[in-house]
Image: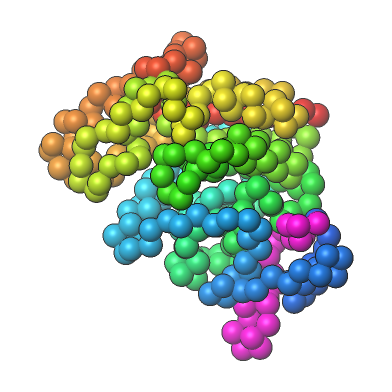
Amino acid sequence: MANLESGKPDRRFPVPVVCPACLATLNDEWHCTTCGRTYALENGFPNLILGERFDDPTDQACMDYEEQSNADLTRNYWLPMFRRFWPGGGARLLSLGCGTGVDVDLLADAGFDTVGIDCGNRTHVWPRRRYPERFLLANGKHLPFPDAIFDGVYCGCVFPHVGVIGDSDRVAPDYRESRAALAQQMARVLRPGGKILVSSPNRWFPFDIFHGRRPGSYTPRFNPPTSPFLLSVGDYRRLFRAAGCVRVEAQPVRGYWGFIRSARTLKGRLLGLPVRFLFWLASLPGAKPLRSWPLNPWLVVLIEKGT
């Protein structure tokens, strides 16, 4: 954030930051003496976005729901999983596409050295986080961090929104290259043996229950499996193996979604029962093959970098 008294950038960001264009060190004014780029502040936060931004909605109702959902996800899914991976705590994590950033606060409170980046329109809510110095604006295809600096990198439903036209389900001609660039960058900043976790709707499931619905609507968007908007486990495997990763495996999904909005009404709870059942079914210990199949509406994929 900016130092409000001096008006100068505050370089308390807990992880080394480099120029996203050339990976050279930035000075205290967010200026790269190697390529000559200077990065400005936006609402007091460094704007290191190179490339496009994500034009996401910012109305108050959307922000309130996102904060509640993010808190529920972190407490019930990310935090238990990260404690299994790094039982001693202290791992350095990158939340890629952190949105409102509630997860960064909760993980930092739990002892994880977590920072968050986003290329959307969430900087106006970052000042109310407990650790606002842990946030900056950046595009995942041009990460402003040195090589091999994180123990873990994770993102929630980021890949489907990369390589698309606006905030739609129509992919751009270069969507493969865009998604490959994101996977390459995530692997680049990961230490050998580190872990990446990505999540999104399953391309093989016939309905997309997470995109294209109006608030309060329970009608899912039909998802033809031939559409490249969503990704499958195989899609993630191809992207990350090309980036030098050695293990790509679908994980249990129970607890990922709290279904906060639908749980407010009887209709929502009843209509949500089949989805909850599928989440439970795909999370059973003997259901590993099922997690990649069309019966599973949501994917969480674990990727490991080679040592």
Relative depth, front residue between 213 and 89:
213
Q: Position of residue 133 (x, y in %)?
A: 61, 67
Q: Does the magenta segment cover residue 16?
A: yes
Q: Nearer the viewer, residue 170 or 107?
A: 170
- Against 115, is 254 above or below? above
| Quarter of the rendering occupied by the C terminus | top right
Question: For the view shown, which residue lies furthest in the bottom direction?
Answer: 5
Looking at the image, which residue is at 46% across and 11% down? 286
Location of residue 101 in the rendering, given as x and y in whole percent from the top left corner = 49, 57
Q: Position of residue 74 (x, y in %)?
A: 46, 45
Q: How many marks?
A: 0
* Residue in the picture at 67% in, 29% down: 240
Instruction: Let me know if residue 8 is in the magenta part.
Output: yes
Give the residue displayed 69% in from the left and 52% down from the top: 143
The magenta region covers 1-22
Q: Is residue 136 above or below residue 83?
A: below
Q: Residue at x 58, y 48 (%)?
A: 96
**Image coordinates for residue 163, horizontal then vertical, percent:** 55, 42
Task: Tell me, yes or no, if residue 48 can be seen here.
Answer: yes
